[in-house]
């Protein structure tokens, strides 16, 4: 028996339940994150056998790590040098896997699935990210709310973790009821129809393309989404502001900065940051000014932009390109290299940058820039989601905007697959396969219209495409396929936007 554990649980749960979100955030804003991660490092050395052995194997004396400058010299952790090298129990506190009461599994995108243990008390800190969204964006402390978890359930981290965090908010006093149909469209639609009328608002939480499929399918089956005051919580994929606008228009929203939010999360680190009304307003401004976005982010695609709590998850930028995090968990992470491509900027620095580029007030977006002064992190989609054409990197984010223009939404889902193909003479061309909405058939001429829209957005947003790709090659070849085509758009499987080169 873990005889002292109930006391710890009661203390942590009591603090979460009885302390308002705003008080927690105010305390964390004045805390020193550098000292916090140094203390976490020392606690991890003392309690985690694998980390002590890792430092020994790396010839690092933990006694010499006395300052944050010393901390920055510590070797980076990653899956291959730490998670796959040391036994799972030894990576847990006290070397005991039973110190954690639950396990999740990463998606195994690298070919090897990884188990990630955590305890209930580890989830309380992540629940604050959900509380930020539900309180500051959805005003769920004032409105009865139905939370519909549309992430897959089971061992995969998204569904169960999301459900737990929403339950904690309900236990904190939010008038929130959670229902868990998972990624089953028919059950989600039944839940919304039968339960939605009893609540002031309904929140759909899920993977963006899947949630869009649910909205489209519901509309095709006669659901009037405007009746349910729909809000969205997304995770797992970068999307454009045009896509956000499209989704909100379909459910009757008039407040794009408040009616949706995206979470930046990973199986290993939990939720690392979340969109806020302020970060969404900034992103919408940058979407309207691609040159300013390019100057800030260094790329022609628009990343996910979120705010984060450095006391919860401390970010570092490695070699100016990729991200590492430090944070407490069932398996504590010290300078863990998640390798996502992105960047960091403080609230004050970003406000100064935007002011210098003509945005000094957020009144047009209905947002107060001083409400949430947490720092910002941005993250791009995975690099393997791009294709290279005449030396130009073509990003799904650029192509998606071409599909999200007015006039297309009534007959395509927004899902597509990019490929570089070759004709019989060996000439390469950009080929894009696009999914039609249910019960929609391809009509002559639609391919040309879509191709022209995609080319226009690539030329506007992607300077490499505009300068590297010959004009005669800039118009992509389009193919329209039925909804749920098993070869390109299998239902229930996480969508991939690229394929390796093939012949026509």
Image: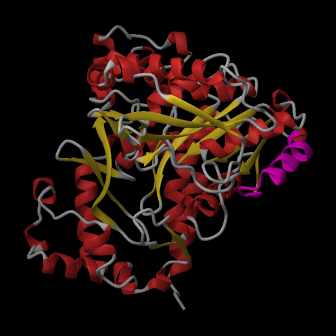
Give the left or right position of residue 91, taking residue 267 as reference: left
Instruction: Pick the residue in front: 402 or 469.
Output: 469
Vertical relation: 107 (above or below) 406:
below
| Quarter containing the N terminus | bottom right
Residue 261 percent coordinates (x, y): 57, 36
Give the left or right position of residue 391, taking residue 89 as reference: left
The residue sitting at 52% across, 67% down in the picture is 121
Q: Evaluate whether residue 89 shows in this view.
A: yes
The residue sitting at 42% across, 45% down in the picture is 385
Does the magenta segment cover residue 183? yes
Q: Main secondary structure of the magenta part?
A: helix
Vertical relation: 12 (above or below) 135:
below
The residue sitting at 16% across, 59% down in the picture is 71
Magenta highlight range: 180-196
Q: Evaluate whether residue 257 shows in this view.
A: no
Vertical relation: 191 (above or below) 418:
below
Does the magenta segment cover residue 390? no
The residue sitting at 57% across, 69% down in the picture is 10
Residue 14 percent coordinates (x, y): 58, 61
Give the left or right position of residue 37, taking residue 246 as reference: left
Instruction: Pick the residue in front: 272 or 441.
Output: 441
């Amino acid at each position: 028996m873990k005889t002292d554990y109930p006391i710890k649980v009661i203390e942590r749960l009591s603090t979460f339940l009885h302390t308002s979100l705003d008080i927690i955030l105010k305390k964390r804003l004045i805390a020193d994150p550098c000292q916090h991660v140094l203390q976490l490092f020392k606690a991890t050395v003392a309690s985690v056998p694998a980390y002590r052995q890792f430092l020994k194997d790396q010839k690092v004396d933990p006694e010499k790590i006395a300052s944050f400058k010393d901390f920055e010299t510590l070797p980076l952790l990653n899956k291959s040098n730490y998670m796959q090298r040391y036994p799972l129990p030894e990576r847990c506190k006290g070397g005991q896997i039973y110190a954690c009461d639950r396990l999740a599994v990463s998606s195994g995108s690298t070919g090897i699935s990884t188990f990630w243990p955590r305890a209930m008390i580890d989830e309380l800190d992540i629940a604050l990210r959900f509380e930020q969204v539900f309180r500051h964006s959805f005003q769920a402390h004032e409105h009865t709310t139905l939370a519909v978890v549309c992430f897959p359930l089971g061992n995969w981290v998204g569904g169960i973790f999301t459900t737990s965090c929403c339950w904690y908010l309900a236990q904190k006093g939010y008038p929130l009821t959670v229902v868990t149909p998972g990624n089953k469209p028919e059950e989600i639609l039944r839940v919304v129809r039968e339960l939605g009328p009893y609540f002031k608002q309904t929140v759909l939480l899920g993977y963006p393309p899947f949630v869009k499929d649910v909205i489209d399918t519901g509309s095709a089956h006669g659901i009037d989404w405007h009746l349910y005051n729909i809000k969205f919580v997304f995770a797992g994929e970068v999307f454009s502001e045009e896509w956000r606008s499209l989704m909100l228009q379909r459910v009757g929203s008039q407040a794009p900065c408040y009616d949706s939010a995206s979470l930046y999360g990973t199986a290993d680190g939990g939720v690392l940051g979340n969109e806020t009304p302020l970060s969404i307003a900034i992103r919408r401004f940058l979407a309207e000014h691609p040159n300013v976005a390019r100057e800030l982010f260094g790329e022609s695609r628009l990343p996910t932009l979120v705010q984060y709590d450095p006391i919860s998850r401390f970010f570092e930028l490695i070699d100016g390109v990729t991200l590492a995090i430090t944070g407490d968990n069932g398996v504590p992470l010290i300078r863990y290299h998640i390798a996502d491509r992105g960047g960091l900027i403080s609230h004050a620095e970003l406000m100064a940058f935007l002011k210098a580029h003509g945005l000094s007030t957020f009144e047009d977006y209905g947002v107060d820039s001083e409400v949430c002064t947490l720092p910002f992190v941005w993250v791009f989609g995975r690099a393997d989601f791009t294709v290279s054409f005449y030396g130009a990197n073509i990003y799904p984010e650029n192509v998606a905007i071409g599909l999200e223009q007015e006039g297309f939404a009534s007959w395509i889902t927004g899902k597509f697959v990019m490929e570089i193909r070759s004709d019989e003479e060996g000439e390469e061309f950009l080929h894009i396969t696009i999914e039609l909405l249910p019960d929609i058939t391809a009509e002559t001429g639609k391919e040309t219209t879509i191709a022209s829209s995609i080319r226009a957005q690539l030329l506007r947003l992607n300077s490499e495409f505009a300068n590297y790709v010959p004009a005669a090659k800039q118009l992509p070849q389009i193919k329209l396929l039925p909804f749920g085509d098993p070869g390109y758009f299998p239902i229930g499987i996480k969508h991939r936007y690229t394929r390796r080169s093939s012949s026509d």
